[in-house]
Each structure stands twice: as structure tokens, then as C-alpha cells.
Amino acid sequence: MSYETLIVETHGAVGLIRLNRPEALNALSLKLTSELTQALRALEADDAIGCMVLTGSEKAFAAGADIKEMAGKNFSDVYLEDFITATWEEITRCRKPVLAAVNGFALGGGCEFAMMCDIAYAGENAKFSQPEIKLGVSPGAGGTQRLARFVGKARAMDMCLTGRMIDAKEALEMGLVARIFPTESLVAEVLKIAAEIAAYSRPTVLAVKEMVNRAYETTLSEGMRFERRLFHGLFSTEDSKEGMAAFLEKRKPAFKNR
């Protein structure tokens, strides 16, 4: 499938999606978010793919929503078209892990896209911000909700109420990203991580992702019960038997995703 605003590649068992609107710093237009939904669904449905990577350019991951598209809208427009919900949130519906490789600007919706991914990694030149307050609006794709859960109330309030920009080092310190890599090697490094994840047992990877996400949706006791049940269930897979046998026999496991 060909796309106008994306470049989609496969690297072994990893799907790479590159946002590609260089003239607009990868601003999240309706065309781009609609094509991203299609690309994610296609990779999700591909049995050969075990993990996905979302990135932009070295200059910009994504500079936020397309203000030219937003400027003329009123409440009825955005409410009736279900703006953001309709085309932005496919990342959160993927069962396979989605990793963000963030270089350059991740502003507003770009920062929110990174937070929708399961793990965000930053290049040394990455810049994160929720600057919507400067436009007279608020974040609308998780900037007040995911950010508060990830970095805490004080830091989320600080970013959302001032619109200030933070660099990769501060993003790492506050837990917004998992690791920092040199700008020029970021995508290659994240592809290596994605390939490692994709090589593990698919049922186990999906279960672990589900367990961690449940931690944000429930109490500790209910989360522990959920984790324990999935943990018990994994003992019924062929891959769990293979993984333990390989460990005892001091060899590399040959997972069959069953």
C-alpha cells in the first residue's frame, strides 16, 4: 500500500512507520492520521510482524496538530466529527508493541503520540512540549491525562500550564522516555530493540504489554490478580515449555508463537 504522508518499511519482523510531511514538520493533518491508522492496522494484521516503530525526521517527530486545519473549526465541528478520537488513537488499540523513536520536535500532538506508544526513546536533539495553552486551547489527545500518570501532577501541570519545552535529558529524568541515543543512530537503535522484542514469544509479548497497561487502569490488588492469571495462563503455551527447556539445555529458544 502506498501513502502520501508516511513511509512504511519492514525490517524482518519489525514494521517501521516514518511520518513524512517535511514541509510542515510532520504536523498531524487529517490525511496523515488517517493514513497512520491504515498503516498500523495493516502491520497489526501481518503475522510476520511482531513489533512496530513510529518515527519522524531528525528535525521533527511531529510538530503537533495541523493548526491550518484546526483554526476554522467550532465546537459543533470537532464534536460531531469526533476530532482526535476518530483518527488519532489507533496506536492505543494495537496489541503488538509500538515504539516511538523521537528526534527533534515532539510538540502538542507529537508529544501525545509519543505517549500513546508503549515505549518512547529519544534522540539527543529531542524536544517535548504541550504548548496548547499558548493557542487558547488545552491538550486533547492525552496531554493532561497520560502525562500526569507518567511524570506526576506537578510536572504535568508545569508543562501544560506554561507550555515550556523540555529536552531529552529532562524527559528521561522525569520518565517520559526510556533511553536516549545519538540523533543519527536513534532509529537504528530502536529497530534493534524492536527486533529483540519481536523475536520473543508473541503470546507472551502481548500478555506483558496488557499487564503493564492494566496497571494504569486498576488498583494494585486487582492489577496483581490480572497479572497472576495471565502469568498462570502462559504456562499452557508451547513457547513457555520451549523457553524453559532451552534455558536448561543452554541453547537459544526457537519460539513458534504458540
Image (tube, rainbow, N blue to C red):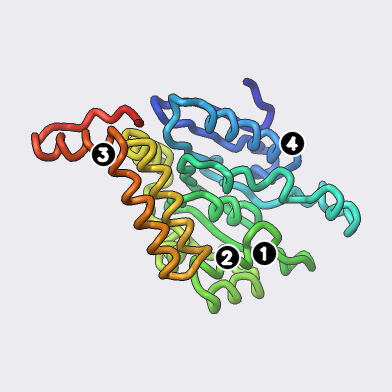
Question: Height in image: 161 above or below 9?
Answer: below
Asked whether the residues under the numbered discs 1 and 3 touch, taking CB atoms below 8 Å apart as contact, a structural biologist would say: no
Q: Describe the element under mark 4 as helix, strand or loop.
A: helix
Looking at the image, do the residues carrying marks 1 and 2 touch, with CB atoms under 8 Å apart? yes
Specify the label residue 78 is tagged with.
none
User: Dot 1 corresponds to which residue?
Assistant: 131
The amino acid type found where label 1 is placed reads Pro
What separation in Å lies between label 4 and label 1 (alpha carbons)? 23 Å
**In whole angstroms, how far apart are the C-alphas of marks 4 and 3?**
42 Å
Mark 1 vs mark 3: give the one in front: 3
Residue 246 in view, yes or no: yes
| First along the sequence among labels 1 and 2 | 1
Q: Which mark is residue 165?
A: 2
- Give the mark nearer the N terminus: 3 vs 2: 2
- Residue drawn 60% across the image and 76% down it: 157
The answer to whether mark 4 and mark 1 are in CB contact below 8 A is: no
Q: Mark 3 points at which residue?
A: 240
Choose the circle earlier in sequence order: 1 or 3. 1
